[in-house]
Amino acid sequence: DEETREQARQARFQAARASLKDSHTVVAERQALIERRKEEYERQQKNKRREEDARIKAAREAARRKEALEAQRVREKRKEAKEKRDAQQARRQQAIAQLTSMGEDVSRFATDPNEDPIAALKELQDKKDKEAEEAEAKARGHAKQLDYLTRATREAEWKRLQTRRRELLEAERKAH
């Protein structure tokens, strides 16, 4: 009986030893699985961080480009406005010079920036054009009168000459 007990005891130890070996293998495999999952999770997190960093970098770059374009647009608008002001000032100076050459008083344009020399020049030119048209109409009227008088004088002179010729012819006939 003791032998059976010994065999049973040995069988239990062998079963326990085998089970320990199996459970050690299971634990090792479980630890390896956990380690692999942990590494995979860390790799995924690292990829997510890299993608997020790339997305943030791209967003910053896009914002920088947008700001640069906006700044360029503002510079161009300022440049256009300055060119427009400069051109307006040049036209103003040119109008003042023309008014001066026409003998107009331009002191009011120097003291009052709201005075418009361009409008004053246009008014003066319109006035001069109107005066020129009136002078031309008057000259045409005088030319018509002169032409009429010339024609009338010629006709009157012609009649007088014909009358004088007839008188001379009659006097010559009487003399013969």
Image: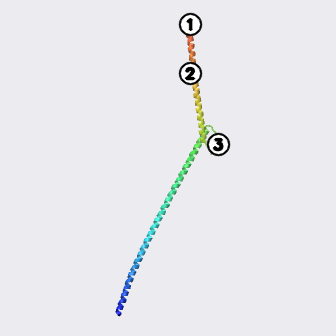
Quadrant location, the C terminus: top right
Please say whether residue 151 is visible from this viewpoint. yes
Quadrant location, the N terminus: bottom left
The x and y percentages for residue 9 are 37, 89
Q: Residues within 10 Å of mark 3 (few under 14, many from 20)?
A: few
Q: Residues within 10 Å of mark 1 (few under 14, many from 20)?
A: few
The x and y percentages for residue 146 are 58, 24
Q: Residues within 10 Å of mark 2 (few under 14, many from 20)?
A: few
Please say whether residue 98 is visible from this viewpoint. no
Whichever of callouts 1 and 2 sits on the residue coming sooner in the sequence is 2
Residue placed at 34% from the left, 91% from the top? 4
The x and y percentages for residue 141 are 58, 27
Whichever of callouts 3 and 1 sits on the residue coming sooner in the sequence is 3
Q: Secondary structure at mark 2?
A: helix
State if disc 1 and disc 3 touch (CB < 8 Å).
no
Whichever of callouts 2 and 3 sits on the residue coming sooner in the sequence is 3
Residue placed at 59% from the left, 34% from the top? 130
